[in-house]
């Protein structure tokens, strides 16, 4: 996977030599992508509809995140390197967008020993241990995304395109019992757009996603280690891991989806609305025996709007509702839940020109609601609600004729309703969910700042350096969390 990614990066760099540089600094890059409504949608065919400048970007970054304020199954400290690149190119009339990333991470002092590298609320089945020993995860990830739109056909009435995405992950956990995790995620999404008249366009995307993953556990000690196969909200079945290991757990996911887009073009404004629906099943198996299934139905609504003089105002709203239920062995439902994620933001660019601006001012909010309920066996429920409003400001500062400095700050406060958690009976794993409820119920400040310096070496190449800082500070307890990232890259 590493060789494939590095080869692809070299190909992107080689292709970049054929074209002249159209974007010369990071402010132009941000404005260009923010204005591209179809590029930000899930329809690859829309790439032929956007008026975007071409770019090629390759960057290397190092980041570290540390602090006590983290979720129950998170890590005290995370550090890692990332190598990646992105591009938008025109190749013989085909518009091609690509993004390539290789990440290596180390997660130190993880609190809960689990078999999965990443836990999510819509997956109640995983292996956990109840001990206080902290442990280390070593994580590698490679991600490749390619979207292409063919030249317009039927006098510009129709465009067609295809998006492909692959993601490979491997992770190794150090503490006993040791765990090895691997997954491969592939998504295909053909799309099309059709012109109704000069002011109205419609589009449709079909999506298929296949995501097999597996985890294996083994112990270094002679006596078997006692673990638990979690079945949601603290209910579990005892398991044991010996020196020869434990039966392999497999997670096999298949998902199908459809997106419908409507694009309205008016005088000085443009809107793109997108409705999406996903349905899929994840089957959890121990060797050849099905332990359980999770069925998911995801509904989404996205709205993007560009308006104002010089298209200097942008409104973005994105909401997703994930409804899921899980079965154990048979098809009888033993639990169900729902997750709502809402993001909304409004951005104003002052003195906006074709490709640059002076000031960036904005405000937004993130809203998250989680609910889950067991209705068989040990009955219980979990609920959480939070909203994080924020404001941001940025300044694009010319330093010399060949260089610019882009500085931005963001200030936000997270408000949370008191979370609820109850589970019938006795379970030593109740504490894991209680700790998560305490974390999700905290009020905290979230402040961020970043600076990007760009130096234009010539008409074909610009170099840049970026420093980003994010600080989260809870209001009622000691200990916060800070994230710092340093990146260097080239635009060409």
Image (tube, grey):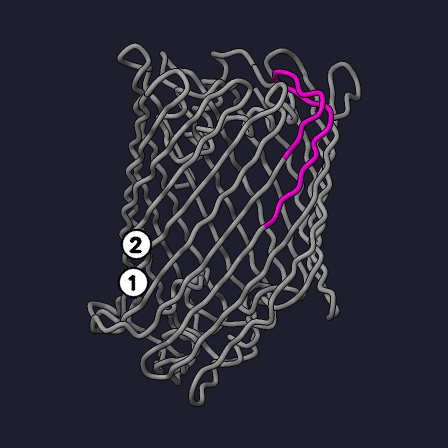
Left or right of 106 on screen, residue 249? left
Q: Position of residue 87 (x, y in %)?
A: 48, 25
Left or right of 147 on screen, residue 392? right
SS assignment at label 2: strand
Q: Nearer the viewer, residue 274 or 93?
A: 274
SS assignment at label 1: strand
Q: Quadrant of residue 170?
A: bottom left
Q: Position of residue 103 (x, y in %)?
A: 51, 45
Q: Residue at x 63, y 20 (%)?
A: 309
Q: Position of residue 413 (x, y in %)?
A: 69, 55
- Establish if 322 lies above or below 63: below
**Which label was assigned to residue 106?**
none
Q: Residue at x 49, y 30 (%)?
A: 86
Q: Nearer the viewer, residue 179 or 402?
A: 402
Q: Quadrant of residue 409?
A: top right
- Labels 2 & 1 near each other (Cβ < 8 A): yes
**Which label was assigned to residue 212?**
2
For the N terminus, the image quarter is: top left
Q: Tell me the magenta residue range.
A: 347-365
**Which label was assigned to residue 250?**
1
Looking at the image, tell me whether mark 2 or mark 1 is earlier in sequence order.
Answer: 2
Left or right of 343 on screen, residue 227? left
Q: Residue furthest right?
A: 399
């Amino acid at each position: 996977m590493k060789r494939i990614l590095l080869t692809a990066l070299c190909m992107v760099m080689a292709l970049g030599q054929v074209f002249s540089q159209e974007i010369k600094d990071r402010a132009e890059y941000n404005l260009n992508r923010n204005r591209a409504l179809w590029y930000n949608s899930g329809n690859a065919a829309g790439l032929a509809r956007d008026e975007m400048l071409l770019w090629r970007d390759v960057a290397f970054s190092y980041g570290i995140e540390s602090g006590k304020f983290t979720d129950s199954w998170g890590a005290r400290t995370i550090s890692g390197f990332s190598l990646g690149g992105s591009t938008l190119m025109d190749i013989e009339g085909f518009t091609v967008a690509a993004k390539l990333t290789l990440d290596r991470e180390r997660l130190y002092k993880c609190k809960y020993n689990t078999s999965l590298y990443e836990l999510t609320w819509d997956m109640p089945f995983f292996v956990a241990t109840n001990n206080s020993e902290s442990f280390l995860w070593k994580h590698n990830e490679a991600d490749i995304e390619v979207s292409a739109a063919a030249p317009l056909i039927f006098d510009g009435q129709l465009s067609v395109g295809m998006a492909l995405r692959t993601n490979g992950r491997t992770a190794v956990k150090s503490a006993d019992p040791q765990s090895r995790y691997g997954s491969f995620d592939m998504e295909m999404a053909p799309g099309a757009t059709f012109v109704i008249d000069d002011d109205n366009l419609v589009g449709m995307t079909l999506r298929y996603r296949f995501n097999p993953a597996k985890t294996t556990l083994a112990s270094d000690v002679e006596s078997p280690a006692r673990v638990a196969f979690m079945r949601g909200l603290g209910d579990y079945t005892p398991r044991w891991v010996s020196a020869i290991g434990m039966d392999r757990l497999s997670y096999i996911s298949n998902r199908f989806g459809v997106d419908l887009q409507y694009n309205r073009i008016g005088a000085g404004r443009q809107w793109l609305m997108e409705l999406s629906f996903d349905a899929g099943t994840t089957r959890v198996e121990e060797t050849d025996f099905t332990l359980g299934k999770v069925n998911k139905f995801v509904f989404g609504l996205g709205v993007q709007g560009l308006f104002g003089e010089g298209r200097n105002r942008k409104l973005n709203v994105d909401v997703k509702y994930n409804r899921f239920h899980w079965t154990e062995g048979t098809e009888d439902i033993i639990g169900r839940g729902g997750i709502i994620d809402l993001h909304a933001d409004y951005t104003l660019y002052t003195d906006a020109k074709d490709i640059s601006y002076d000031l960036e001012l904005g405000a937004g909010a993130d809203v998250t609601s989680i609910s889950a309920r067991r209705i068989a066996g040990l009955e219980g429920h979990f609920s959480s609600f939070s909203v994080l409003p924020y404001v941001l400001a940025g300044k694009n500062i010319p330093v010399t004729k060949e260089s610019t400095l882009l500085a931005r700050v963001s200030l936000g406060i997270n408000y949370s309703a008191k979370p609820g958690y109850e589970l019938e009976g006795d379970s030593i794993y109740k504490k894991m969910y209680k700790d998560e409820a305490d974390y999700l119920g905290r009020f905290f400040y979230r402040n961020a700042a970043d600076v990007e310096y760009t130096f234009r070496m010539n008409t074909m190449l610009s170099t840049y350096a970026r420093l980003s800082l994010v600080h989260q500070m809870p209001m009622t307890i000691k200990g916060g969390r800070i994230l710092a990232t340093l990146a260097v890259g080239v635009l060409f």
